[in-house]
Image: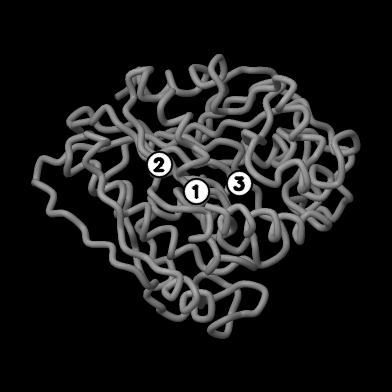
Amino acid sequence: MFLSRFLLVWVVAALSAPSFYCQALQLGGIFSSGRNKNQPRNDERKIQAAVLVPGFLTGASEFQSLCDNLTERGLPTVAVPMPAWHWLPCLGGRSARPILERIDFTVQHLIAADGDITKVPSFQYSLKDAWEDFWTNPGGVAQVGGSQRVDEYPIVEPRGTFDLPELPPNAGKIALIGHSAGGWISRAYLSSRSYGGKAYEGSKYIHSLVTLGTPHQSAPGPAFEGVQWCNEEPAPVRSLAVGGTGFKGDEWGAMTQGAYSFCCNQGTDGTSYTGDGMTPIDSALSFDGAEQLAIQNVTHFSWDTFGAEFVAPELAKDYSNGRPWYGSKGIVEKWADWIVQHA
Protein backbone atom coordinates (compact mmCIF):
# COMPACT_ATOMS: atom_id res chain seq x y z
CA MET A 1 0.00 0.00 0.00
CA PHE A 2 2.83 2.41 0.88
CA LEU A 3 4.58 1.57 -2.40
CA SER A 4 1.39 2.36 -4.34
CA ARG A 5 1.02 5.72 -2.64
CA PHE A 6 4.72 6.54 -3.08
CA LEU A 7 4.52 5.87 -6.80
CA LEU A 8 1.40 7.99 -7.06
CA VAL A 9 3.04 10.99 -5.37
CA TRP A 10 6.32 10.66 -7.25
CA VAL A 11 4.86 10.28 -10.74
CA VAL A 12 2.05 12.82 -10.41
CA ALA A 13 4.49 15.37 -9.02
CA ALA A 14 6.76 14.76 -12.00
CA LEU A 15 3.92 15.22 -14.45
CA SER A 16 2.23 18.21 -12.86
CA ALA A 17 4.44 20.86 -14.46
CA PRO A 18 3.33 20.09 -18.03
CA SER A 19 -0.06 18.38 -17.68
CA PHE A 20 -3.30 16.81 -18.43
CA TYR A 21 -6.40 17.91 -20.42
CA CYS A 22 -8.19 20.49 -22.77
CA GLN A 23 -10.77 23.20 -23.69
CA ALA A 24 -13.76 24.72 -21.93
CA LEU A 25 -17.48 24.27 -22.45
CA GLN A 26 -19.97 25.87 -20.04
CA LEU A 27 -22.77 23.37 -19.34
CA GLY A 28 -25.04 22.67 -16.41
CA GLY A 29 -26.00 19.26 -15.03
CA ILE A 30 -27.91 18.18 -18.12
CA PHE A 31 -28.00 15.31 -20.59
CA SER A 32 -27.49 15.71 -24.30
CA SER A 33 -27.50 13.03 -26.97
CA GLY A 34 -24.45 11.91 -28.92
CA ARG A 35 -24.51 11.86 -32.71
CA ASN A 36 -24.40 8.10 -33.04
CA LYS A 37 -26.15 6.64 -30.02
CA ASN A 38 -26.04 2.84 -29.81
CA GLN A 39 -28.87 0.96 -28.12
CA PRO A 40 -28.54 -2.64 -26.91
CA ARG A 41 -30.54 -5.27 -28.75
CA ASN A 42 -33.83 -6.26 -27.17
CA ASP A 43 -32.76 -9.91 -27.04
CA GLU A 44 -29.64 -9.24 -24.93
CA ARG A 45 -29.69 -10.64 -21.41
CA LYS A 46 -28.44 -7.89 -19.13
CA ILE A 47 -26.95 -8.69 -15.72
CA GLN A 48 -27.50 -6.10 -13.01
CA ALA A 49 -23.81 -5.64 -12.19
CA ALA A 50 -20.81 -3.53 -13.21
CA VAL A 51 -17.02 -3.46 -13.33
CA LEU A 52 -15.22 -0.22 -12.46
CA VAL A 53 -11.85 0.59 -14.07
CA PRO A 54 -9.64 2.81 -11.87
CA GLY A 55 -7.93 5.85 -13.36
CA PHE A 56 -4.22 6.29 -13.96
CA LEU A 57 -2.03 5.53 -10.93
CA THR A 58 -4.99 4.51 -8.78
CA GLY A 59 -6.20 1.10 -7.71
CA ALA A 60 -9.26 -0.74 -6.47
CA SER A 61 -8.97 0.46 -2.87
CA GLU A 62 -9.49 4.12 -3.86
CA PHE A 63 -12.84 3.19 -5.42
CA GLN A 64 -14.24 0.81 -2.81
CA SER A 65 -16.57 3.43 -1.35
CA LEU A 66 -17.96 4.18 -4.83
CA CYS A 67 -18.47 0.46 -5.49
CA ASP A 68 -20.28 0.13 -2.15
CA ASN A 69 -22.45 3.12 -2.99
CA LEU A 70 -23.42 1.66 -6.36
CA THR A 71 -24.11 -1.74 -4.81
CA GLU A 72 -26.43 -0.13 -2.26
CA ARG A 73 -28.27 1.55 -5.14
CA GLY A 74 -29.01 -1.80 -6.75
CA LEU A 75 -26.01 -2.06 -9.09
CA PRO A 76 -23.50 -4.54 -7.59
CA THR A 77 -20.11 -3.20 -8.66
CA VAL A 78 -16.55 -4.46 -8.31
CA ALA A 79 -13.38 -2.54 -9.18
CA VAL A 80 -10.71 -4.27 -11.24
CA PRO A 81 -8.70 -5.96 -8.43
CA MET A 82 -5.41 -4.12 -8.88
CA PRO A 83 -3.26 -1.82 -6.73
CA ALA A 84 -1.92 1.47 -8.08
CA TRP A 85 1.56 0.11 -8.79
CA HIS A 86 0.19 -2.12 -11.55
CA TRP A 87 0.21 1.02 -13.73
CA LEU A 88 4.03 1.08 -13.66
CA PRO A 89 4.49 -0.57 -17.12
CA CYS A 90 2.18 2.05 -18.70
CA LEU A 91 4.19 5.10 -17.59
CA GLY A 92 5.19 7.52 -20.33
CA GLY A 93 2.20 6.85 -22.55
CA ARG A 94 2.95 3.19 -23.31
CA SER A 95 0.57 0.39 -24.30
CA ALA A 96 -2.52 -0.13 -22.16
CA ARG A 97 -2.52 -3.88 -22.74
CA PRO A 98 -1.52 -4.68 -19.14
CA ILE A 99 -4.67 -2.88 -17.96
CA LEU A 100 -6.80 -4.39 -20.74
CA GLU A 101 -5.87 -7.88 -19.54
CA ARG A 102 -7.10 -6.98 -16.07
CA ILE A 103 -10.37 -5.54 -17.38
CA ASP A 104 -11.05 -8.65 -19.49
CA PHE A 105 -10.31 -10.94 -16.54
CA THR A 106 -12.66 -9.07 -14.20
CA VAL A 107 -15.48 -8.67 -16.73
CA GLN A 108 -15.55 -12.32 -17.75
CA HIS A 109 -15.36 -13.61 -14.19
CA LEU A 110 -18.22 -11.34 -13.10
CA ILE A 111 -20.36 -12.58 -16.01
CA ALA A 112 -19.47 -16.20 -15.20
CA ALA A 113 -20.64 -15.55 -11.62
CA ASP A 114 -23.89 -14.07 -13.02
CA GLY A 115 -23.17 -10.74 -11.35
CA ASP A 116 -22.08 -12.01 -7.91
CA ILE A 117 -19.29 -9.55 -7.07
CA THR A 118 -18.07 -11.72 -4.17
CA LYS A 119 -17.01 -14.45 -6.60
CA VAL A 120 -14.57 -12.43 -8.70
CA PRO A 121 -11.11 -13.88 -7.97
CA SER A 122 -7.75 -12.14 -7.93
CA PHE A 123 -5.09 -12.69 -10.55
CA GLN A 124 -1.40 -13.36 -10.01
CA TYR A 125 1.07 -10.55 -10.68
CA SER A 126 4.39 -9.93 -8.93
CA LEU A 127 6.83 -7.05 -8.63
CA LYS A 128 9.14 -9.08 -10.88
CA ASP A 129 6.36 -9.21 -13.50
CA ALA A 130 5.90 -5.44 -13.21
CA TRP A 131 9.62 -4.82 -13.62
CA GLU A 132 9.83 -7.00 -16.74
CA ASP A 133 6.67 -5.41 -18.19
CA PHE A 134 8.16 -1.98 -17.50
CA TRP A 135 11.09 -2.69 -19.83
CA THR A 136 9.17 -4.43 -22.62
CA ASN A 137 5.71 -2.82 -22.79
CA PRO A 138 5.74 -0.99 -26.15
CA GLY A 139 5.19 2.63 -27.15
CA GLY A 140 5.46 5.81 -25.13
CA VAL A 141 8.04 8.57 -24.98
CA ALA A 142 10.90 6.05 -25.27
CA GLN A 143 9.25 4.37 -28.30
CA VAL A 144 9.79 0.94 -26.77
CA GLY A 145 9.53 -1.57 -29.61
CA GLY A 146 10.21 1.10 -32.22
CA SER A 147 7.10 3.29 -32.33
CA GLN A 148 4.67 5.42 -30.34
CA ARG A 149 1.73 4.53 -32.60
CA VAL A 150 -0.72 1.91 -31.37
CA ASP A 151 -1.08 0.23 -34.77
CA GLU A 152 2.70 -0.17 -34.95
CA TYR A 153 3.21 -1.74 -31.51
CA PRO A 154 5.03 -5.08 -31.64
CA ILE A 155 3.11 -7.94 -30.04
CA VAL A 156 4.27 -8.18 -26.43
CA GLU A 157 2.19 -10.30 -24.07
CA PRO A 158 1.82 -8.76 -20.59
CA ARG A 159 3.10 -10.79 -17.66
CA GLY A 160 0.78 -12.21 -15.03
CA THR A 161 -1.70 -15.06 -14.79
CA PHE A 162 -5.15 -14.10 -16.08
CA ASP A 163 -7.03 -17.37 -16.37
CA LEU A 164 -10.43 -16.83 -17.96
CA PRO A 165 -13.60 -18.77 -17.12
CA GLU A 166 -15.74 -20.70 -19.58
CA LEU A 167 -18.84 -18.70 -20.35
CA PRO A 168 -22.14 -20.39 -21.23
CA PRO A 169 -23.75 -19.66 -24.63
CA ASN A 170 -26.47 -17.58 -22.95
CA ALA A 171 -24.08 -15.49 -20.85
CA GLY A 172 -25.43 -12.02 -20.12
CA LYS A 173 -23.83 -8.60 -20.40
CA ILE A 174 -22.79 -6.19 -17.66
CA ALA A 175 -22.04 -2.46 -17.40
CA LEU A 176 -18.55 -0.94 -17.48
CA ILE A 177 -17.53 2.25 -15.66
CA GLY A 178 -14.20 3.95 -16.37
CA HIS A 179 -12.72 6.73 -14.28
CA SER A 180 -10.29 9.18 -15.94
CA ALA A 181 -7.83 7.22 -18.12
CA GLY A 182 -9.78 4.09 -17.23
CA GLY A 183 -12.53 5.47 -19.47
CA TRP A 184 -10.60 5.60 -22.74
CA ILE A 185 -8.95 2.26 -21.95
CA SER A 186 -12.47 0.85 -21.51
CA ARG A 187 -13.26 2.11 -25.02
CA ALA A 188 -10.22 0.20 -26.33
CA TYR A 189 -11.53 -2.89 -24.54
CA LEU A 190 -14.89 -2.63 -26.33
CA SER A 191 -13.31 -2.42 -29.78
CA SER A 192 -13.11 -5.31 -32.24
CA ARG A 193 -9.89 -3.83 -33.69
CA SER A 194 -6.49 -5.21 -32.74
CA TYR A 195 -4.77 -3.23 -29.98
CA GLY A 196 -1.12 -4.24 -29.61
CA GLY A 197 -1.81 -7.60 -31.21
CA LYS A 198 -5.11 -8.47 -29.50
CA ALA A 199 -8.73 -7.55 -30.18
CA TYR A 200 -10.60 -7.78 -26.87
CA GLU A 201 -14.07 -7.37 -28.42
CA GLY A 202 -15.49 -6.29 -25.08
CA SER A 203 -18.77 -5.22 -26.69
CA LYS A 204 -19.66 -8.94 -26.57
CA TYR A 205 -19.74 -8.67 -22.78
CA ILE A 206 -20.76 -5.03 -22.11
CA HIS A 207 -24.20 -3.46 -22.63
CA SER A 208 -23.40 0.07 -21.35
CA LEU A 209 -20.34 2.22 -20.70
CA VAL A 210 -20.03 5.26 -18.42
CA THR A 211 -16.86 7.37 -18.39
CA LEU A 212 -16.16 9.75 -15.50
CA GLY A 213 -13.83 12.69 -16.12
CA THR A 214 -12.11 10.89 -19.00
CA PRO A 215 -9.88 12.80 -21.46
CA HIS A 216 -11.53 11.83 -24.75
CA GLN A 217 -10.16 14.64 -26.88
CA SER A 218 -7.07 13.94 -28.98
CA ALA A 219 -4.00 15.98 -28.08
CA PRO A 220 -0.28 15.99 -28.93
CA GLY A 221 2.15 13.58 -27.34
CA PRO A 222 2.54 9.84 -26.79
CA ALA A 223 0.19 9.86 -23.78
CA PHE A 224 -2.68 10.54 -26.19
CA GLU A 225 -1.82 7.95 -28.84
CA GLY A 226 -4.29 5.55 -27.23
CA VAL A 227 -6.99 8.21 -27.08
CA GLN A 228 -6.45 9.00 -30.76
CA TRP A 229 -6.74 5.29 -31.57
CA CYS A 230 -10.07 5.09 -29.72
CA ASN A 231 -11.36 8.18 -31.53
CA GLU A 232 -11.13 6.41 -34.87
CA GLU A 233 -14.50 4.77 -34.19
CA PRO A 234 -17.70 5.76 -32.35
CA ALA A 235 -18.99 4.04 -29.25
CA PRO A 236 -19.90 0.41 -30.10
CA VAL A 237 -22.31 0.18 -27.13
CA ARG A 238 -24.73 2.51 -25.39
CA SER A 239 -22.46 5.08 -23.68
CA LEU A 240 -22.53 8.09 -21.38
CA ALA A 241 -19.67 10.60 -21.06
CA VAL A 242 -19.73 12.45 -17.72
CA GLY A 243 -17.71 15.59 -17.02
CA GLY A 244 -17.53 18.20 -14.29
CA THR A 245 -17.26 21.98 -14.10
CA GLY A 246 -16.35 24.49 -11.43
CA PHE A 247 -12.55 24.59 -11.63
CA LYS A 248 -10.95 27.26 -13.83
CA GLY A 249 -7.41 26.67 -14.93
CA ASP A 250 -6.08 29.96 -13.56
CA GLU A 251 -7.65 29.59 -10.11
CA TRP A 252 -6.78 26.11 -8.77
CA GLY A 253 -3.03 25.82 -8.75
CA ALA A 254 -0.28 24.27 -10.83
CA MET A 255 -1.79 20.79 -11.02
CA THR A 256 -5.05 22.00 -12.56
CA GLN A 257 -3.45 24.48 -14.96
CA GLY A 258 -0.87 21.95 -16.07
CA ALA A 259 -3.45 19.21 -16.46
CA TYR A 260 -5.66 21.35 -18.68
CA SER A 261 -2.67 22.47 -20.77
CA PHE A 262 -1.44 18.91 -21.27
CA CYS A 263 -4.72 17.93 -22.90
CA CYS A 264 -5.18 20.89 -25.18
CA ASN A 265 -4.72 20.29 -28.89
CA GLN A 266 -4.12 24.01 -29.49
CA GLY A 267 -1.02 24.52 -27.36
CA THR A 268 -2.27 26.90 -24.64
CA ASP A 269 -1.31 27.27 -21.01
CA GLY A 270 -4.60 25.92 -19.63
CA THR A 271 -5.63 29.05 -17.76
CA SER A 272 -8.80 29.78 -19.74
CA TYR A 273 -10.42 26.36 -19.42
CA THR A 274 -12.87 24.92 -16.92
CA GLY A 275 -13.47 21.37 -15.81
CA ASP A 276 -13.26 19.08 -12.78
CA GLY A 277 -9.77 20.19 -11.77
CA MET A 278 -8.00 17.61 -13.92
CA THR A 279 -10.05 17.07 -17.09
CA PRO A 280 -11.53 20.02 -18.97
CA ILE A 281 -15.24 19.64 -19.65
CA ASP A 282 -14.86 19.72 -23.42
CA SER A 283 -12.43 16.82 -23.35
CA ALA A 284 -14.60 14.83 -20.94
CA LEU A 285 -17.60 15.09 -23.29
CA SER A 286 -15.76 14.57 -26.62
CA PHE A 287 -16.82 10.92 -27.00
CA ASP A 288 -18.33 10.26 -30.42
CA GLY A 289 -21.58 8.34 -30.19
CA ALA A 290 -22.06 8.83 -26.45
CA GLU A 291 -24.72 10.73 -24.55
CA GLN A 292 -23.29 13.58 -22.46
CA LEU A 293 -23.79 14.65 -18.87
CA ALA A 294 -22.12 17.77 -17.44
CA ILE A 295 -22.31 18.12 -13.65
CA GLN A 296 -21.61 21.45 -12.02
CA ASN A 297 -19.15 21.86 -9.16
CA VAL A 298 -17.71 18.35 -8.90
CA THR A 299 -14.04 17.50 -8.50
CA HIS A 300 -12.18 14.81 -10.40
CA PHE A 301 -11.22 12.48 -7.56
CA SER A 302 -11.61 11.80 -3.85
CA TRP A 303 -8.55 13.77 -2.85
CA ASP A 304 -8.10 12.14 0.58
CA THR A 305 -5.42 9.65 -0.49
CA PHE A 306 -1.86 9.69 0.82
CA GLY A 307 0.19 12.50 -0.74
CA ALA A 308 -2.69 14.36 -2.39
CA GLU A 309 -2.06 17.42 -0.24
CA PHE A 310 1.45 17.66 -1.74
CA VAL A 311 0.71 17.14 -5.45
CA ALA A 312 -2.65 18.95 -5.58
CA PRO A 313 -2.95 20.99 -2.36
CA GLU A 314 -5.74 23.26 -3.61
CA LEU A 315 -7.89 20.35 -4.78
CA ALA A 316 -7.22 18.30 -1.64
CA LYS A 317 -8.18 21.17 0.65
CA ASP A 318 -11.33 21.88 -1.38
CA TYR A 319 -12.35 18.22 -1.18
CA SER A 320 -11.73 18.11 2.59
CA ASN A 321 -14.02 21.16 2.88
CA GLY A 322 -16.90 19.19 1.39
CA ARG A 323 -16.65 19.44 -2.40
CA PRO A 324 -18.19 16.29 -3.93
CA TRP A 325 -16.57 14.13 -6.60
CA TYR A 326 -18.17 11.80 -9.16
CA GLY A 327 -18.46 9.07 -6.52
CA SER A 328 -20.09 11.14 -3.77
CA LYS A 329 -23.62 10.51 -2.60
CA GLY A 330 -25.87 13.06 -4.24
CA ILE A 331 -23.74 12.90 -7.39
CA VAL A 332 -23.67 9.16 -8.11
CA GLU A 333 -27.38 8.94 -8.85
CA LYS A 334 -27.04 11.60 -11.57
CA TRP A 335 -25.23 9.05 -13.75
CA ALA A 336 -25.79 5.65 -12.09
CA ASP A 337 -29.54 5.76 -12.68
CA TRP A 338 -28.77 5.94 -16.40
CA ILE A 339 -27.32 2.41 -16.06
CA VAL A 340 -29.85 0.97 -13.63
CA GLN A 341 -32.90 2.08 -15.62
CA HIS A 342 -31.66 0.20 -18.70
CA ALA A 343 -30.16 -2.91 -17.06
User: Seen in the image, is 216 located left or right of residue 49?
Assistant: right
On the image, the x and y values in percent for residue 98 come to: 43, 64
Residue 228, image quadrant: bottom right
Q: From mark 3 to mark 1, how far is it between C-alphas? A: 21 Å
Q: From mark 1 to mark 2, how far is it between C-alphas? A: 8 Å
Q: Are marks 1 and 2 in contact (CB under 8 Å)?
A: yes
Q: Foreground: 18 or 233? A: 18
| Quadrant, the C terminus | top left
User: Seen in the image, is 14 located left or right of residue 39?
Assistant: right
Which residue lies under the disc numbered 2? 79
Which residue lies under the disc numbered 3? 216
Query: How many residues crowd mark 1 within 10 Å: few (<14), some (14–19), many (20+)?
Result: many
Q: Foreground: 277 or 63? A: 63
On the image, the x and y values in percent for residue 41 come to: 25, 32
On the image, the x and y values in percent for residue 136 come to: 49, 80
* Residue 209 sits above or below residue 342 on the image: below
Q: From mark 2 to mark 3, how far is it between C-alphas? A: 21 Å
Which residue lies under the disc numbered 1? 59
On the image, the x and y values in percent for residue 44 come to: 20, 33
What is the three-letter code of the residue carrying label 2?
Ala
